Image: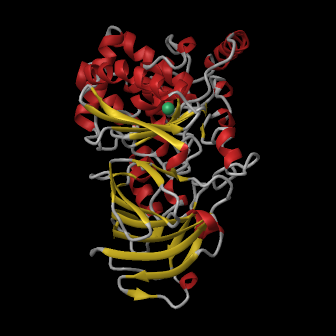
Amino acid sequence: MNKDRLPGTAWRTRLLAGLAALSMQFFSCSPGSEHPGHIDAWENDLPSYADELRFVDDALRIDIAAIDATLTYRPQEAAVDGTARVRFRMRPGQTRPRIHFDPACCGDVISSWTLDGRAWATPSDAFQVVDVPGSTQRMLEFVEEVDPVREHELIVSYRLALAGGYPCFSTEVHDLKGSGNEELFPTLNTPHELARHRITLRVAGAAPYRCLGSGSVACTAAGDVQEWVLDPEREVASYTLMFVLLPEADTVLRQGAIAGIPVRICAFRGGADIDAAWNELESWLPQLVADIGPFPMPRGLSVFLVSGGGGMEYFGATISSLSALSHEVFHMYFACSAVARTYRDSWIDEAVTSWYDRTYPDYLFPIGEDFRSSMVSGRSPVAVGFDGRAYYQGTQIMETLARRLGGRSALVSFLAYVHSRYAFAPFSTMDLADYLLDFSGVDMRDEFREWFYSDDSGGTADVAVPADCAAPPDLTPPRSILRRQGLDHGRRGRDGGGE
Ligand SMILES: [Zn+2]
């Protein structure tokens, strides 16, 4: 996701100067990196880094192999009927499964629950909703233990109520807040849980719909019901899966190839300028291929171009405004193929992207020598979302790495190196420091500990921009379309629209 581009800089310059002065005062009484106690301190209390994987296993319990979901959208009823089949095994030492599925945490939406072939007469008896320490998300914890070794299959049927208004059904992932597709089907909402997804999308209604999404999107006739099968064709993180379903008559589509990459750009009729987006990609995609490597998604790129707000990146797809497009497309490399191990590590995606595409040029200077933060260690490994300092201080840290390596092209080469070796192999913040050492011989592990696993005594925490400054894409159709639908004041979406 991108954040709103920054307004005037004067206030911020003053703020930074003030905080820098403040941080100097704190720095003078903070232990240095050579202090043995401080070296230990980066192994934080949330748990220690060394215990992170164990902690994540204890919290998330299962390892998903595949999710096959059928989502039938009923525009007339503003509802979706879903059936999901999840195949999983237990993580080491675990016997009682848990899964994320937000609607069932908030209401009685599940109409059938079958585990390993056994249907429960009353689905709500099969699980309890639990709070997970360290996470603001709740999970469904199965009431019975299962075999810790063999594969299991959970099949659930459910109904989702949409907000109504304009008849559009789409993913609405918000990575800064940490909400993902657990709002639409049972899954694990964590970056490192890569799983095969096959989502069958159906529309019950006579009006022709258009479907745009991640990976292969095959239209499959099914009588009176329109149907598409969406398949990324490889294991991906659930929150990187995108689809948009909306009336075909309200949309325009341009498709073709740019530098050999299949590209589809769709927008509301009378809405965003798809030719301008196409022109931008004609220079941007070849640049990314030359700098970072082959486009990571064999089926290319699908863009739903909106007129307002920012953007959100997905596997081989984005819902984005024109101003955020280049940022979101760079995320195909970092966020949608190279992925962080936990949400708290995903500052990496925003820092790398914001630095590469110069999203915030005012921040393209090295991080202050006194900068230290709990950007990673201040959050639990099972917390959702990430620290907002990823964007601005993250950009400065990337600029610091660039200068240490010898300039912009050297850091770009490092990014290409990381992507070529670690795409679809989730890695942590300290793994990235190790990769830097492997690549260049430059050891910045102490700095990484200071920057990410220290504390906020440098006074820099207040520089973080509040999370509500994030700019999700606004999928509100042009007024001409709303008027035609008799919805001039209507808003789309499960929560009534963008923000
Ligand atoms: Zn972003």
x and y percent of residue 291 in the render? 28, 19
| Residue at image coords 35%, 82% | 116
x and y percent of residue 3 in the render? 59, 29
Res 188 visible: yes
| Residue found at the far right of this picture | 489
Quarter holding residue 139: bottom right
| Viewer-proximal residue among 384 and 72 | 72
x and y percent of residue 322 in the render? 52, 26
| Residue at image coords 56%, 40% | 176
| Viewer-proximal residue among 181 and 11 | 181
The type of colouring in the image is secondary structure
Res 369 visible: no
| Viewer-proximal residue among 68 and 163 | 163
x and y percent of residue 215 in the render? 33, 47
Position of 449 with respect to 27 (left or right) is: left
> In the rendered image of this protein, does residue 103 appear above or below residue 462?
below
| Viewer-proximal residue among 196 and 132 | 196
Quarter holding residue 62: bottom left
Position of 409 with respect to 31 (left or right) is: left
| Residue found at the far bottom of this picture | 121
> In the rendered image of this protein, does residue 496 appear above or below residue 445?
below
| Residue at image coords 66%, 14% | 16
Quarter of the image containing the C terminus?
A: top right
| Residue at image coords 72%, 13% | 18
